[in-house]
Image (tube, rainbow, N blue to C red):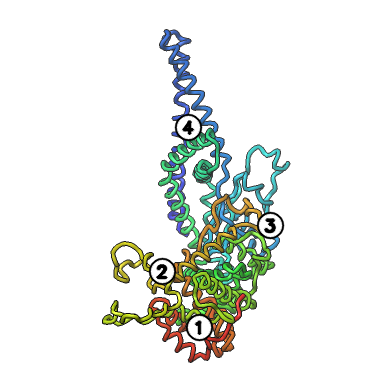
Amino acid sequence: MSGIGVEAGAQAARSRALAVLRVRGRALGVAVLPAGAEVILLAGAVTGHLVGPGWDAARWAVGVLAVLVLLATAGIALVVSRARPATSPTVPVPEESAPDLYRMVRDLAERLEVPAPSAIALTPDCDSWLEDRAHAAHGPPPHPGPGEAAIPGGGRRSPRRVPVAPVLVIGSPFLWWMRVGELRAVLAPVVAGTGPSAHPDIAAARRFVHGLDATAAIAATPGRGPLARAACAVLGRVARLLLGACREHAAQLERGVAAAAAERAQAVDYGARIVAQEQVGLAYAGWDRLLTRVALPAWRMGRWPSRLDAGVVAALTELSRRDRLAEGFASRLGERPACDLLEEPGTVDEAASLLAARLFHGGPAECGPDWAPVDWQSYPEEVVDRTWRTDAARLHRVLDSLGARPARPAPTLSRVLDHLTEPPAAPADDAGTASPGAAPAPAAPGSALLPYDHAPDGPYEEPGGDPDEDPGTERSAVLAAGLSAAVAREETAVPRGATAAGQGPPSTLWDGGALPLVPLQPPRTARELLADHVTAMVCCAAVDTAGAVPALDWLDGPSLLLHGERAADLTPRVLSLIERGDPGPLRDWLAAAGIRPEKPIRLV
């Protein structure tokens, strides 16, 4: 390793840490200025230099001000020191459940000549970092590991708090997709960060910044009384002022620590790290695809896949078969995966999968009748088929509320096609020239949904003038609006983040905040909802009338298998019906696939 580079990065980090501590020192200096002025005034009175009614009044005024400022300073300092810094929601990995993983990390720290992390935790994301959890509010420090001496006499008789190394947080997809050597190479720069973190100045500066951040969060908490709001306003203003003064120094501090860690890690598995970085990008792409295409439909149905990390391996293996750029990645599967470092990888995968559902969707913290795990073998039946039939049932309920043609004797696909079909426009020559005594033409189904006197006001706009507007016919717009309202009502009826017993999420995972913390996708537009519901109706008809089966595609999520092949050309035909009111392409596709739209289908 380059000692000069490591020393330069560490020195830059220490200088920035001292700059942060100087901000703290200046703040304390400003706080004691009134007290210093009062000492000078009292000394002047004792020596007989500052005497008289005016100086006496000044001594009283400055003395009261000094007491108030000192009390306020003590209160703010107490809040900053005791405020609980926010921690990332993770799955703790005790040493007894992963002795090989802890042994690998300690060996890596020994090779890097840095302190070993105090504990290991997993996060359902493709990232790894060190997290300081030495604050007293985060619980007692972990038990000393092998080779580490315990504190004599116990913690109660310890004169000072022993520094605790940060916790190593590892992305759970890395453990399942990467091999052991690749994981060690990727973790080397992260573990190397424990060296600079152990410096007293850097640790003190980080504690100060984290305390200010936690204090600002406390001050912003709503639902307080008038006096508490006033105190919190002062508290929050001071915390934000100090954060603004040390923000640039704190950012440069972290850059210096990262530079020193990266320079130190170059001596360990540097060649393997270059190859492993390719796997990091691939794992991220596969994980994102798995969450948005596969896990999200299940979460919306009240089911959470219990083997997400194992699923990312299947997704990336499928990608290696489809993409020429991914050739060679499947051959890696013959090597030992990093998840073998865990004693019970299935249990850890299930815990990480449930945490992912909470973070990205806001699901409950516990299992229940409406929030149950599902394995990959049952996914097509419990998720794909139920999703299609639930959407189809909602579509027909909205059609009933809009006064469409009744579904007799049972719901059919033809009802949807007929409702969305745009009636042919009357010739221009015949407009307004109906013969005397002629009866008015019968209204098409659904044409009375928007009467003439409820036409929107304002000038006419050409279609496509606003790129944010969803294209579609008048009937599609009305049906899409009804579906959006129905979905919103259903989502409102089920509180997010509630447990099976109706309790809120445990506060030990993260400090408040609305769930989900990291939404995967923005809410679907009305057009997307309508397209999904019509597609679900077509898939139900295919299953019930043409012998199709629901299936799971690792890269695209729920799919329909027709005669053993995936139906991949359905979406453009559904969009043609929605946007132009033309059922021709979809009817041709149904006829070619042997699907009979006039036959009744089974709903949930």
What amino acid is at disc 4? Leu
Residue 34 picture location, percent across and down: 45, 24
The residue carrying mark 4 is: 28
The amino acid marked with disc number 1 is Ser
Q: Name the residue under label 3.
A: 501
- Which of disc 1 and disc 3 is earlier in sequence? 1
**Quarter-of-image position of residue 360:** bottom right
Per the image, label 3 sits on a secondary structure element best described as: loop
Residue type at the position of mark 3: Ala
Which circle marks residue 191 in the picture? none
Side of 569 where 306 appears, left or right: right
| Foreground of the two, 465 or 438 | 438
Q: Which residue is under mark 1? A: 414
Q: How crowded is mark 1: few (under 14 residues within 10 Å), some or many (20 or more)?
A: some
Q: Which of marks 2 and 1 is nearer the N terminus?
A: 1
Closer to the chain start, of discs 2 and 4, is 4
Give the mark toward the camera: 3 or 1.
1
Q: Is residue 362 visible?
A: yes
Extreme residue toward the front, this view: 437
* Residue occupied by mark 2: 450
The relative height of residue 493 versus residue 82 in the rendered view (above or below) is below
Say which label, 3 or 4, has the lower sequence index: 4
Instruction: Give the residue at the far left of this rendering.
Output: 429
